[in-house]
Image: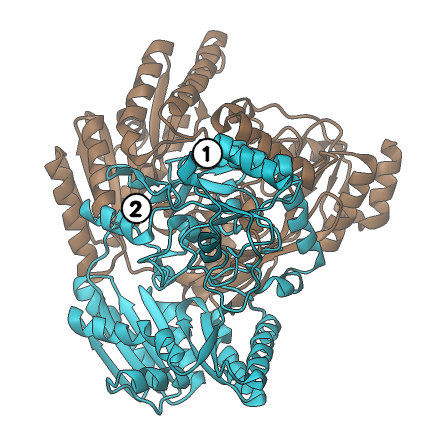
Chain colours: A cyan, B brown
Amino acid sequence: MSVDLLRELAAVLPPEALVTDPDVLESHRRDQAGWALAGVPRVLVRPGSTTEVQAVLRVASAHRVPVVPRGAGSGLSGGANAVDGCIVLSLTRMNRILELDRRGLYAVVQPGVINGALKSAAAELGLWYAPDPASWEFSTLGGNLATNAGGLCCVKYGVTGDAVLGLEAVLADGSVVRTGGRMVKNVAGYDLTRLFVGSEGTLGIITEATLKLRPRPPRATTLVASFPTLVGAGAAVTEIMAELRPSLLELMDRTTVRAVEAARPMGLDVNAAALLLARSDAGGEQGVAESTRMAAICEAVGATFVAHSSDEAEGELLMGARRFAFPALERQGSTLLDDVGVPLSRIPDLLAEVERIAGQRGVLIGTFGHAGDGNMHPTIVFDPNDPDAVARARAAFDDILHAVLELGGTITGEHGVGSLKRPFIARQLGPETHRLHLTIKSAMDPLGILNPGKLL
Amino acid sequence: MSVDLLRELAAVLPPEALVTDPDVLESHRRDQAGWALAGVPRVLVRPGSTTEVQAVLRVASAHRVPVVPRGAGSGLSGGANAVDGCIVLSLTRMNRILELDRRGLYAVVQPGVINGALKSAAAELGLWYAPDPASWEFSTLGGNLATNAGGLCCVKYGVTGDAVLGLEAVLADGSVVRTGGRMVKNVAGYDLTRLFVGSEGTLGIITEATLKLRPRPPRATTLVASFPTLVGAGAAVTEIMAELRPSLLELMDRTTVRAVEAARPMGLDVNAAALLLARSDAGGEQGVAESTRMAAICEAVGATFVAHSSDEAEGELLMGARRFAFPALERQGSTLLDDVGVPLSRIPDLLAEVERIAGQRGVLIGTFGHAGDGNMHPTIVFDPNDPDAVARARAAFDDILHAVLELGGTITGEHGVGSLKRPFIARQLGPETHRLHLTIKSAMDPLGILNPGKLL
């Protein structure tokens, strides 16, 4: 059976697209979610075209063998982790930008194109591909689509799904569907584009995407503010969002600020409860006016220090502190990076809950993230060689997810469910909505071969 | 059987929620799509709660009776038209704003709330509900959601679906699902919110929605430009969109301008091939700078007249011409209002095709619409008492849809497929994608009772 599988795959794929070398398989077993389980794949396929993806899925269907798609493997939820005996389907060879249309404001790309490569190509036309997950320099657009990846710019420009005009996807049975198109507005039929985006490879394999490009926004002005209380920082976020449209609104808590300052001293206020970073890209005088107004709001709700700058170098320096948040925490031990979301008004409650959990479990948790979207990354730091510490870290991770659900939030704002958070999905969705997920999944993938054990 | 149906509905609904009066039924048979077919309903139900909607769907399932949901009946594609023997389910009694949260930036509403009522309620908190279909003063949010309604502001602020955080919907079997939540970012599970939005009542009945509110944008500056050629106007649209983010970008062709000027003389250039209206709400100096830049772009691509104004009254006067486009065309005869979309770069081709079709069929077609989104409304004007003119108008309507598909466009940008464009949907989607629609429809509504004969 397994020999048949390989023979049949070899019959439909060029030799370079079929890999059974154990070392290569080993390097394609998992993504970046440290402690999510991963099985041992039977084979790695690296198709070069939609037709080859179709052929792989037909063989997989015939043998009822699971197919686990992957891009760069930079995911953070185990969504690309292998299951035993599966076909790992890497899309990295399908890495061409097929079309870049300045007048139509779109790009047509294969799933293996790196996010940053599209950004560069768009910039050459004076345009911008907005979505900017932290991994933008090495993650693939296919992976961004499969997880509906977020990033820093979402607060003004939306998530990956908001930048998608249309898709081509191969279904479990090998048939090809095309959704959407090159039009901005289109209500002909169900929004299947959005159904595939964020479905983590469980409904189909995305083989092409038409993505929206935008004009590049004006140069941003940057603001930093520190707050003596979490409630004050939370109030600044809600007041700014109720009045203005910042192009970025990020928060770092005290633990995170201290980690950054410890690794790269830059004079951040290590006694503040939280630091807020905000940007306006409204442009020119209006950008300055918005920054000034944001500064005034921060002061009015009790910020102890506020500074803003239209200078690009200074702005980048401040942004550097935020970008260094996770690496700085990583220097202090092993980490469990979480990704949760709450309604905007509940940010202070979330931060307070995380503090409570850190105390109760006796663990260090640094929290940072996209405050303007209510999407935060509590990051548990622990000693991997201390079994008790590991157990407490895992318990804290679960505690955070439970707390978030109590706050009316989500167990994942931008990283995805994958295998890591699968035990929590039914609880967030509730039985009827979970059942509807299963209904759609079994209608579209009746043999259950597409990325089993993920998301649902 | 029919007597049983009524008796069972009477058992689960209060008396005022069950209507069999033929005159009332007659007034609930159709929406505003003049020539879409409409059947004769058996009964009208007007539930007051989700529980009552569930009860109706359980009875309908038991009897396998079609259910046709409707809001204000302002739809333009026959999506709310009755089928023979159906239950018409009006959501207009479920018209409460349940929650309005300034700090969370969301509103929780029932489907029967009028769009304008939410706008007003949000304005009282200094906030803004962005989606603005032309019918905003009388259409319901439920109808807006079911059709994924568009409007003038979409070019910067997106369509109805972009303003939805979460939904409650009743499925065909009477079960209730909740999608999304009150969080801005959320990737836990499939994007079922977007699956329901725009599904025209064929997958479930939306009984509650959590909608995104925003800060009110700064006051807009308004620009008008007239072009001697369609190509020039199209070039202005693509150049503006590649460089700036207008808050509105509308086009009227010569036939439309002449109709407006004939009904309400206001000195518009009746010899121009097209008139462009644009707005910037970047605010203050930046708004003026953007308008000035848009004016320069228009001049550079050959506009013969350009004027812009930051004066609100002047801006409203110019906008009045655009808002009057359809009423002005209606004064010249009966109308077939179409709604098509093309990639941004194909707008001049679309306008040229419409001109060609008008000539070939010997009909008058005025085209106006949301140029910045590539979403236009060619409107065929004809004499309803001349059977030959009626036939030619219908033929032209079909010609336009065929032409749009040839241009890689969509048969509907914002009005929906309904029953009017159902004959064209399979052609746009292609056989595989159409089949996937049917797969999802039968999985979610196995008895086919939800708004049959619409969309698919």
Instruction: Tell me the residue at 41%/35% (across/down).
Output: A49
Name the chain under label 1: A
Q: Which residue, given by chain and number where applicable, does mark 2 sit on?
A: A213
| Residue B410: quadrant of the picture | top left
**Dot label at residue B166:** none
Residue situated furthest top in the rendering: B388
Q: Is residue B331 visible?
A: no
Marks 2/1 in contact by CB < 8 Å: the verdict is no
| Residue A16: quadrant of the picture | top left
Instruction: Tell me the residue at 57%/65% (across/down).
Output: B99
Q: Which residue, given by chain and number where applicable, does mark 1 sit on?
A: A13
Give the percent coordinates (x, y) of residue B348: 26, 27
B351 left or right, relative to A391: left
- Depth check: give the residue in front, B168 or B109: B168
**Structural crowding at the residue carrying mark 1, measured as other residues with C-alpha within 10 Å and reported as few (<14), some (14–19) or many (≥20):** many
Q: Secondary structure under badge 2? A: loop
Task: Give the position of the C terminus of chain B as an image quadrant.
Answer: top right
User: In the rendered image of this protein, does residue B130 appear above or below residue A387?
Assistant: above
User: In the rendered image of this protein, does residue B372 appear above or below residue B103?
Assistant: above
Instruction: Tell me the residue at 31%/15% (across/down).
Output: B356
